[in-house]
Amino acid sequence: MSKTIGLEGSPRAGKQPASATPPIVVRNRRFGRARDGHAPASRWWADGDPVGTAWLNGLSITFPQGETLFIDAVKAFRDGVPPKLAEEIRDFVKQEVNHTREHLAFNRAVEDAGYDLSGVQARLDVQMDEVRAAPPIVWLGVTVALEHFTALFAHEFLAQPDRYISGDNEQAELWRWHSVEEIEHKAVAYDTWNHATRSMSRWKRWSLRSALMLRVTRNFMRSANRDALDLLAQDGITGMRAKARLAWYLLGRPGMLRRLLPAWAAFFLPGFHPWDRDDSALIRGYDAPRTGHDHAAALMPAT
């Protein structure tokens, strides 16, 4: 991670040094391939919960195109970054390429389970076209905002597994793997943003990233809710019943959105940095039981 900053670019005292942040480790794993002898997932793979399954399936559909955007956005501004950040960008790209590959496979399994994803995909295509039509600095700002979201979701999945994806199946393991790598690289887009906007005033930099976060949050919540309701309808859960169950999942129990609200709001603090919240213990907790030969063989060396 590059140097921790304070008020939109000034050095910030009292924070852990860059050397204390975890390295970005590329875990080149594959999940749920029938040819590898894995049993097909049940339709409601998320602990038998149709609502949790719909919410997570809806997110997964967006990941391949979203992560391609993230890669393009960061690469567009990598020239002239410090050597440490350049190395992190290379490993960020490798992780995101692997995530794209695995969520494409995951999404095919969702279709194999009987879901029609065409409506979700059509809406996503329109949204991505709108983002791609904007200047690359907007791509990067959108990436910063969405990487904040994914890091918050990842923290929840790993810190509270019994609430979301406690199952012992390949689909749940995919989400745990993806989550740990999202935490590892959660500052890469943000540090690239700080490099790309280094000529801006502190006020302009803060106001621009804050405005983009508000817009991204609005659009994300609208689309994610609609996508989940679309998938729930295919399970016969419709109308107010579907909306009430989804709202309870997000705001009641397990209450993912309710629980991550304070950490989401921290993004708007002047001098915010993703590693202000040190959740590196979750990375160690994930890796500790997976340090055998098979796991070690899946780790790609950093470049």
Image (spheres, rainbow, N blue to C red):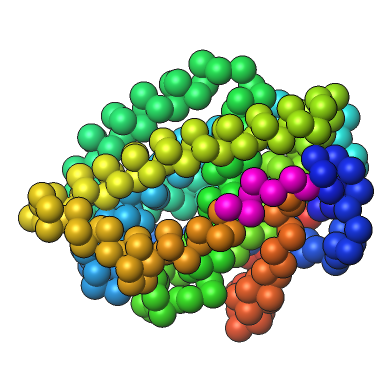
In the image, the segment drawn in magenta is 265-271
Let me know if residue 269 is in the magenta part: yes
Q: Position of residue 203 (x, y in %)?
A: 76, 31
Q: Indicate whether residue 131 is drawn in magenta.
A: no
In the image, residue 252 above or below residue 168: above
In the displayed structure image, the side of residue 270 where residue 43 appears, left or right: left
Horizontal side of 208 relative to 22 (left or right) equals left
Residue sitting at 85 percent across and 52 percent down?
4
Can residue 50 be seen from the camera position used here?
A: yes
Instruction: Give the x, y percent position of residue 160.
Output: 48, 76
Q: Residue at x 21, y 48 (%)?
A: 229
Residue 140 lies in what quarter of the image? top right
The answer to whether residue 170 is visible is: no
Q: Residue at x 50, y 24 (%)?
A: 131
In the displayed image of the protein, which residue is found farthest to the left? 236
**Quadrant in which residue 162 is drawn:** bottom left
Residue 188 screen position, x and y as percent: 72, 46
Residue 303, placed above or below residue 220: below
- Judge whether 31 appears above or below 70 on screen: below
Name the foreground residue: 128 vs 211.
Answer: 211
Residue at screen point 63% across, 79% down = 285
Is 19 placed left or right of 121 in the picture?
right
Q: How many marks?
A: 0
Residue 23 lies, with reference to residue 296, above or below; the image says: above
Q: Is residue 252 left or right of residue 192?
A: left
Task: Name the spot of residue 204 as percent of width and height, x first.
Answer: 74, 27
Q: Quadrant of residue 124?
A: top left
